[in-house]
Image (spheres, rainbow, N blue to C red):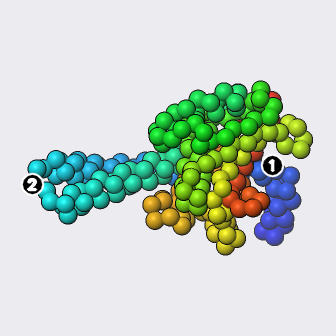
Amino acid sequence: MPRVGARVVLAYSGGLDTSAMAQQAQQLQLASLGRLTASIAHEIRNPLGAISHAGQLLAESPNLDDHDSRLTRIITGQSQRMNAIIENVLQLGRRTQTSPELIGLQAFLTDFLREFLQQQRLPAEVVAVRIEPENMQIRFDLTHLRQILTNLCDNALRHSRASSGNPRVELLGGLGLDRNRPYLDVCDHGEGIDADTVAHIFEPFYTTSAAGSGLGLYISRELAEANQAHLHYAPMPGGGSCFRLSFQDPRRQMQ
């Protein structure tokens, strides 16, 4: 009889909306992850803050020689890096908290780039923007969109600077083949990414940079999926990299 019961369960489960069940399971998993990461981050931040503050006080000492000054800069720099990693990890727990809204992409990019380039201390000419049609709208969580584009633009600037010495980024927006789903490409003119590395770039903690945390692209893809969008990589013809953020039809309400 257990065999018959098993058949009944399997036959019945075949008619269920397994995608919805999987999404609910993922939401529960992410909620648990969020609580865990928040707890760990709190425990790390307290001693990290003490280390950072002690390093700053030490750096103000008038009796430091060049060697000691270099060591205090290392303390400060690595403390800042650790704090950035903590912030990235905390983003994993916030994935479920989406507040999508209709966004005019052209106007958003104007505001975003003004702030981003000011922080980077770079002129506006560094980033070329072309959005067609200009009145294109997307439906997305505004905070998540800023986080994703900050990660992608940071990467693009770093790779283009490493390749040519001149930072340059292109942001290209348009509509997909069905003319309903908008997309935004973030492209650089660096050396591109080899096939072996491409297979791992969206994995957590995978990085080819000594200064990177390996979380930027992973978190960006997770945030994209939380907004029913998709982030993927494509090589640029003639060299360089392009990351495409494909949005849902903005006329659809997110479930």
51 or 240: nearer the viewer: 240
- Above or below: residue 100 compared with residue 194: above
Label 1 vs 2, first from the N-terminus? 1
Left/right of residue 131 with respect to residue 93 in the rendered view:
right
Q: Residues within 10 Å of mark 1 (few under 14, many from 20)?
A: few
Would you identify the image quadrant in which residue 112 lies? Answer: top right
Label 1 secondary element: loop
The location of residue 235, given as percent across then percent down, is: 73, 60
- Identify the residue at horizontal 77%, vertical 29% (top origin): 134
Which element is circle 2 on? loop
> Callout 2 environment at 10 Å: few (<14), some (14 to 19), or many (20+)?
few
Q: Residue at x 66, y 27 (%)?
A: 107
In the picture, the quarter occupied by the N terminus is bottom right
Q: Position of residue 2 (x, y in %)?
A: 78, 68
- The residue that mark 1 highlights is 17
Front-most of residues 242 and 219? 242
Q: Nearer the viewer, mark 1 or mark 2?
A: 2
Q: Residue at label 2? A: 63
- For image coordinates 66% across by 63% down, the residue present is 192
Residue 154 visible, this orientation? yes
Q: Is 247 placed left or right of 196 in the picture?
A: right
Q: Marks 1 and 2, how far apart in space? A: 69 Å
Residue toward you, 23 or 53: 53
Amino acid type at mark 2: Asn
